[in-house]
Image (tube, grey):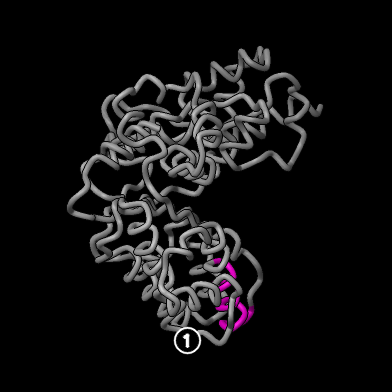
Amino acid sequence: MQYIEEIISQSHHLTLTAIFLLILIIVAARTLLVRKPKPCRLLETDRPRDFKKLIEGGWSFVDKSLLIDEFCNFNGRLAVTTNLSMIAYFLSVSDSDKEFRTRRSLFKGLSIENRHETFENFFAKFPVIYIDFMNTLVDHDTWDSMYKCLQDLISSVYRRHSYVSSSLNSTRQIVFQQIIECNRNLSRKEWEDALKALSCYLCKFHGKPIIALVDHLDVPVQISIDKGYFIEANRFIKNMFSEFLKENPYLEKAMVAIVDTSNKKIDKILPANAWEYPLPSSDRVFQYGFGFTEADLIQLAKTFNVVDFDGIMKRTFQCKTGVKPKIALYNPQSVWSELYLRFNT
């Protein structure tokens, strides 16, 4: 959560920051929670990725909430699935007092709660567009199939913000409804401009620029490379994000999480003004928002009464941060696997 605070503080020069996360570090974000009352729940493969479901479901949370603080106060515009959903729940405007109280309770007892200024300035204050491209992780053999999937994804984003439609003129209302209904007859240009148009509507409706959170952008890119239609996919996705993220007056900040950065073609899709933060890096920015530290492992060991703590450290993947002194970050997926074995053998 400290992440969030750092990034949101600058409201003028809308500079986009894309956080490139190593695949083993990003997988970690999904394993931040394990249910405290019943360790046997570790056996379940359907553990939630959504921050709200994790907290309300009573799962034990390795507190990375200061990622919010960093994101909100970082001097730029930028930032994995659990972490991005956590940021979205923190920043998104609420439509009722009940929802406000419910979301406020999600952060009760977390580190970000002590950052009073961040809470005062940023909690439930911004319209948020959150889009997760993991939904495109299907074996699309053709560009036509992928294109329809991307249309469906954009349509789902519009449905989450359907309330702004009533504030639009009749012409825009028609297009808005067609996107919600995923009308395949809409022009390619209308689909490419859809996210920027939505950011405009949300900004004018709420009186504040939007926060954009984009997860797994590399997924459709890699599929298009593997299936041989990268040129078509690149043209559409690049045009869409150039409109949405590069020179968008309705955008406050953006966080783009990319899991696999091994293919340089991914760089061609991002705007030229994107700031890259590989993890681990030589900068202290965002170092602790992803991955488990030794202190996190100690907490988990106590929670689940794990005696062989040194064994977990030896058998889980770790990497060293570039900062000095160097800090070991452990891949949460590896830690999860070790805990899983202990409760299944």
Dot 1 corresponds to which residue? 187
Magenta stretch? 141-153
Spot occupied by residue 40 in the image (x, y as percentages of width and height): 78, 26
Q: Residue at x 49, y 38 (%)?
A: 86
Q: Residue furthest left?
A: 13
Q: Is residue 233 above or below residue 25?
A: below
Spot occupied by residue 273 in the image (x, y as percentages of width and height): 23, 61
Spot occupied by residue 141 in the image (x, y as percentages of width and height): 64, 79
Q: Is residue 320 above or below residue 298?
A: below
* Helix, strand or loop under label 1: loop
Asked if the stretch drawn in magenta spans residue 298, the answer is no
Does any portion of residue 31 appear in the rendered image? Answer: yes
Q: Amino acid at mark 1?
A: Ser
The one of 40 and 70 positioned closer to us in this rendering:
70
Kindly indicate the quadrant of the structure image that contains residue 121.
top left
Q: Is 196 left or right of 176, judged from the image as shown?
A: left
